[in-house]
């Protein structure tokens, strides 16, 4: 009952945080009433069962309440002076709490520019002017805003007790990092990750391989580490003949020291609280059930930090533990007559943990490696050796024996190198299963979990029901997959409406509605755009848009207009007297094509599409250069939205965000958004605006092996985090987006040439 009550309370807090529903009290209280009626517990037990969820939910609702004032400020992409508390999380994105002004007090995220020098302390106080924007689509839970410093911000280290412990742990981790040796840089990084959760030295490709195979729990501190620390201290104290209470106190002290070292990671806190509960039971000579210890850990952490109710790391830690405690024994029993006992145990633990976490994992990574369970089984034998050696090496470093610690770490890196080789070999075959995005994936994953639980039951009716649930869920999820996926298809097939032509290092975009065609930019050379339009069968261009007069956007104009009827052309109103601009305008005039000069607010139609010019302002006002004065357009029909951003830099994108109330409506979010990424994926982007747009598909027109470094890693990381699909002409050739006969969105490519 305690564990069930803890999970119901947790779910209630999460529902309140997401949906602000008033009936969050009902589920936990109903569970207590049913328990009381069925099992007749004592009055004290009932009182405790009622009090715990009431207190936890009261604290949670008080702390998680959203602030409408900050929401309004963020929606306006405003700039304001703030005093904020900052907790360092990872490079580039920190947790932030606004302290002043009081009317804006709330929690969110702070984006740190890569060029800004950062302080080593993990908890900081920032004072200065900040840009306040809406939270990104994939921000951490309960983030009510994103902040970016404007100009110089004054930064100081926090001086409270929690910050002191955090900084102490950070210093210890830095010393351990300095003393750690390895057979390879990657193995060294993995040893650090397993020892104290420091993944700063682990290569990104290795992290991706571990992620694909569900091995990320290896490079994070977990309950195993806490168990080893407790075991080492107990063994040492037993060796010196300490009493039972002294052994328990010493093990608890060692656990606290380890917590200071690794920091307040949710998985570690959960394991530590469970360890403390078990140690207290040992002090009294009693065994405390593991499920009750897990319940106490969940309720304690939710009381201490209610935001854990929506924290993926906390959820994965709890459900992995729950799977090992509850599902693994049932699986082991099912396997015992078919497999050797050792293999049955290892397989059941790995499978139980992965199945229990599956409904959460699909929200983070819909693509799952089919060899994940195999990878976990093959990795399991060596992980304890790495963990023990790593913890011993950390202790040696902490007490000043850095030289011996280095060789201990080196010994740990040998089996770590095996894990890296294992991850590489099993991820290369590419055996993956793509779960449906969103709810469909969660439904399928939950159905698999419930079905396995039911099938391993001792009751035949439940086993049969589990099989039925599995079949139904797979069928329903297949339907969801067909409806929601962006499927690969042949180039420009079906009812294609968007093509990013491969014109090398330049832009050339085609938008179509029935027989109505618009061409936006034409690349540098006439031949590529001409060949692309011929392949698409375009002989009549209703609207030709030349966003600005950089040659990689207008140099190929002759290839687009020669041999084709062009009804009208739209040119930027930004004044540009460069020779290329003059020559392009003369070419358009000599072809007898009527010309309009774009400015914000101009509207028109293209078949079923309506279009709106978002920039530049009249006569290019507020634009610093030709890129800033390039034409940005918003297109929409009943099925899809498109934003073509030309080469608009971050400054121009900020203007779009500030003027959002003039062109954006909430109803627009109901349709998928296609984003033509600005400036070939350069780093000159306004991340908060792109995160807010949350495009379903982002296309990048860029030349293979260009000398500009486009697209940049910064922009690719940004698009990967906030969009579902990123397509590049340098990798795929010309790219098309279509709706097939059933109305499903598909993409195709001509192949990179």
Image (spheres, helix red, strand yellow):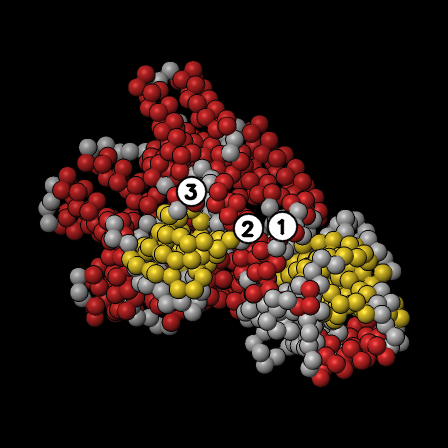
Label 3, label 2: how far apart the Cα atoms are: 16 Å
Residue 283: in sight, yes or no? yes
Name the element at disc 2.
Answer: loop
Classify the position of the C terminus by image quarter.
bottom right
- Of mark 3 and mark 2, the one earlier in the sequence is 2
Which residue carries the number 3 mark? Answer: 103
Left or right of 413? Residue 531 is right
The residue sitting at 66% across, 68% down in the picture is 620
Residue 76's disc is 2
Q: Do callouts 2 and 1 mark residues in contact (Cβ within 8 Å)?
A: yes
Task: Check the image and report above or below for 108 versus 281.
Answer: below
- Relative to the observer, which residue lies in front, 86 or 452? 86
The residue sitting at 83% across, 63% down in the picture is 517
Label 1, label 3: how far apart the Cα atoms are: 23 Å
Residue 490: in sight, yes or no? no
Label 2, label 1: how far apart the Cα atoms are: 8 Å
The residue sitting at 54% across, 69% down in the picture is 683
Left or right of 109? Residue 596 is right
Residue lying at the far left of the rendered structure? 241
Which residue carries the number 1 mark? Answer: 661
């Amino acid at each position: 009952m305690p564990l069930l009550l803890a999970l119901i309370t947790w779910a209630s807090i999460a529902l309140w945080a997401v949906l602000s529903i008033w009936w969050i009290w009902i589920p936990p209280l109903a569970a207590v009433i049913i328990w009381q009626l069925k099992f007749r517990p004592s009055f004290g037990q009932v009182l405790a069962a009622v009090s715990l969820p009431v207190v936890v939910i009261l604290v949670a609702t008080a702390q998680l309440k959203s602030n409408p004032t900050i929401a309004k400020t963020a929606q306006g992409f405003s700039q304001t002076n703030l005093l904020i508390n900052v907790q360092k999380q990872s490079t580039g994105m920190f947790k932030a709490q606004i302290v002043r002004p009081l009317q804006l007090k709330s929690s969110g995220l702070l984006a740190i520019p890569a060029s800004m020098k950062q302080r080593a302390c993990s908890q900081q106080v920032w004072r200065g002017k900040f840009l306040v924007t809406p939270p990104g689509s994939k921000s951490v839970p309960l983030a009510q805003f994103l902040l970016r410093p404007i100009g110089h911000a004054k930064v100081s280290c926090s001086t409270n007790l929690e910050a002191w412990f955090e900084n102490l742990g950070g210093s210890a981790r830095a010393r351990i990092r300095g003393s750690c040796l390895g057979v390879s840089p990657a193995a060294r990084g993995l040893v650090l990750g397993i020892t104290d959760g420091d993944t700063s030295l682990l290569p990104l490709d290795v992290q991706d391989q571990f992620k694909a195979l569900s091995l990320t729990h290896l490079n994070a501190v977990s309950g195993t580490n806490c168990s080893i620390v407790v075991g080492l201290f107990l063994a040492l104290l037993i060796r010196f003949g300490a009493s039972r209470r002294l052994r328990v106190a010493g093990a608890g002290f060692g656990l606290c020291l380890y917590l200071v070292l690794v920091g307040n990671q949710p998985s570690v806190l959960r394991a530590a609280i469970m360890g403390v509960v078990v140690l207290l039971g040992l002090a009294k000579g009693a065994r405390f059930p593991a499920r009750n210890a897990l319940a106490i850990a969940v309720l304690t952490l939710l009381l201490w930090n209610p935001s854990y109710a929506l924290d993926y790391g906390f959820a994965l830690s709890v459900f992995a533990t729950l799977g090992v405690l509850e599902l693994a024994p049932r699986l082991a029993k099912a396997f015992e007559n078919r497999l050797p006992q050792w293999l049955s145990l290892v397989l059941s633990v790995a499978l139980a943990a992965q199945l229990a976490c599956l409904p959460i994992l699909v929200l983070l990574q819909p693509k799952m490696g089919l060899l994940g369970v195999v990878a976990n089984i093959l990795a399991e034998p060596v992980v304890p050796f790495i963990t023990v050696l790593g913890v011993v090496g950390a202790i040696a470093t902490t007490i000043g024996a850095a030289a011996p610690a280095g060789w201990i770490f080196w010994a740990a890196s040998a089996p770590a190198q095996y894990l890296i080789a294992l991850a590489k070999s099993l991820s290369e075959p590419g055996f993956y299963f793509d779960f449906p995005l969103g709810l469909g994936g969660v439904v399928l994953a939950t159905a698999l979990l419930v079905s396995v639980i039911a099938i391993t039951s001792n009751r035949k009716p439940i086993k049969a029901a589990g099989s039925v649930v599995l079949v139904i869920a797979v069928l329903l999820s297949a339907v969801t997959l067909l409806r929601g996926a962006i499927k690969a298809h042949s180039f420009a097939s079906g009812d294609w409406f968007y093509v990013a032509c491969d014109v090398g290092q330049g832009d050339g975009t085609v938008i179509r509605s029935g027989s109505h065609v618009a061409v936006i930019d034409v690349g540098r050379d006439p031949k590529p755009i001409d060949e692309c339009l011929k392949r698409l069968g375009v002989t009549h261009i209703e609207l030709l848009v030349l966003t600005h007069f950089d040659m990689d956007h207008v140099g190929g104009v002759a290839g687009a207009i020669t041999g084709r009827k062009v009804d009208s052309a739209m040119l930027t109103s930004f004044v540009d007297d460069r020779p290329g601009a003059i020559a392009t305008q003369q070419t358009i005039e000599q072809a007898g094509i009527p010309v309009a000069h774009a400015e914000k607010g101009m509207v028109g139609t293209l078949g079923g599409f309506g279009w709106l010019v978002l920039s530049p302002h009249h006569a290019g006002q507020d634009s610093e250069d030709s890129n800033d004065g390039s034409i940005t357009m918003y297109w929409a029909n009943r099925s899809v939205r498109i934003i073509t951003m030309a080469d608009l830099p971050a400054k121009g994108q900020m203007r779009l965000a500030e003027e959002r109330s003039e062109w954006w409506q909430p109803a627009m979010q109901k349709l998928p958004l296609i984003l033509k990424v600005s400036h070939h994926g350069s780093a000159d982007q306004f991340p908060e605006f792109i995160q807010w747009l949350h495009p379903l598909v982002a296309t990048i027109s860029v030349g293979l092996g260009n000398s500009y470094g486009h697209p940049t890693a910064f922009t690719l990381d940004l698009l990967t985090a906030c969009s579902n699909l990123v397509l590049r002409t340098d990798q795929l050739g010309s790219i098309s987006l279509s709706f097939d006969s059933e109305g499903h969105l598909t993409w195709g490519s001509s192949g990179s040439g």
